[in-house]
Image (cartoon, grey):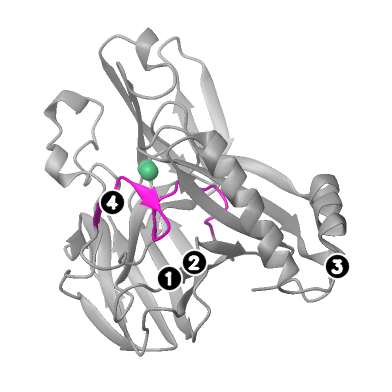
Amino acid sequence: MKITKDKVFYSFCAKNEPALTVDAPARIEFETMDCFGNQLRRPEDVMEALDWDRVNPATGPVYVNGAQPGDALKVTIEKIVLNEKGTVCCLTDEGTLGARIEGSHTRVTEVSGGLVHYRAANGLAVDIPVRPMIGVIGVAPEGDLDINTGTPGAHGGNMDNTMVGEGATLYFPVAAEGALFGFGDLHAVMGDGEIGVSGLEIPADVTVSLDVVKGKAPAFPVLETEDKISVIVSQPTVDEACQKATELMQELIAERTDLDLADIVMLMSLAGDLQICQIVDPEKTVRFVFPKKYIPGLTF
Ligand code: CA
Ligand code: ZN
């Protein structure tokens, strides 16, 4: 099954028309546009020409038969095939250093041989290994909520988490019938924080598999890899996101072990990593990451 890049939405909402309806489990290929709706693809394309109504398109949504509020939608990212060209930008008043920047700047950058070939204005050539990831990914939020694809939250959305790459499995809280899952905003590479407000924004073809875990909706998305489990929390401030992510990881561990609370706290303090996803979107996103090998049974 495949969804082409003309099937996009710009807000996560229970009222969206499904682009595709599937039975779980399902394996689907998604074509995605970059976060600019593929509008900045040549060196002469400038931010000022952007049609902001076409920013952050997510491909989908997919209606998953049988997915109901209270369930978890399990999403495994099987394969990411990047386009050969990506775009990075920065502009005045946007991002952590926006107050120091004048005007807007874009670099259309070649991607080949597993490298991002960044070329600076002074001629410096910087080749950065690709680390493909999905910036915007999620499900419809509850009730009448309508959350634009630029904003992260409990439903997922614009989390810009570098761990959302090939081999990762995410669990989202289903809040609307059918889950209405979709994603976009691929990055060939991005640093934690995304301080300049963009990664290397790039179209891509992505294969995911979907399944439903009945009755196991997490409060915020959970991400699992072969050796780690993490919770991804978005809040108005980084401080609030750190507090909430730490609480949710403690609860996740407590539900899966008979360790004392004090031991959980001490183990989290010794071996857990609280890491920044992004600090430039309307809500800030952090993840609490814990190695699975230390606690038997520590899996979603
Ligand atoms: Ca993003
Ligand atoms: Zn992006």
Instruction: Find residue 4 and report its horizontal and vertical position in percent.
Output: 23, 68
At label 3, the amino acid type is Leu
> How far, Cα to Cα, is label 3 from label 2?
37 Å
Of marks 2 and 1, which one's residue comes earlier in the chain? 2
Considering the numbered disc 2 on the image, is that residue within a helix, a strand or a loop? strand
In 3D space, how far apart are the residues under numbered discs 4 and 1 (Cα atoms)?
20 Å
Give the extent of the magenta segment: 146-165
* Relative side of 111 to 147, left or right: right
Is 192 magenta? The answer is no
Q: Are marks 2 and 1 in contact (CB under 8 Å)?
A: yes
Query: Separation of disc 2 and disc 4 at Cα?
Result: 22 Å
Going by the image, does 131 lie left or right of 45?
right
Which of label 3 and label 4 is nearer to you? Answer: 3
The percent coordinates of residue 297 (x first, y second) are 78, 76
Residue 259 is labelled as 3
Q: Which residue is mark 2?
A: 79
| Pick the front one: 125 or 139 | 139
Q: Which mark is residue 207?
A: 1
Please tell me whether mark 2 or mark 4 is closer to you in this view: 4
Ligand 1 quarter of the rendering: top left
Q: Is residue 89 left or right of residue 161?
A: left
- Give residue 258's position: percent from left, percent from top: 84, 73
Q: Please, is residue 249 above or below residue 124 in the view?
A: below
Mark pair 2, 1: CA separation: 5 Å
The tag earlier along the polypeptide, 2 or 4, is 2
Mark closest to the chain's N terminus, 3 or 4:
4
List the residue tagged with mark 4: 149
User: Would you say residue 46 is visible in this rendering?
Assistant: no
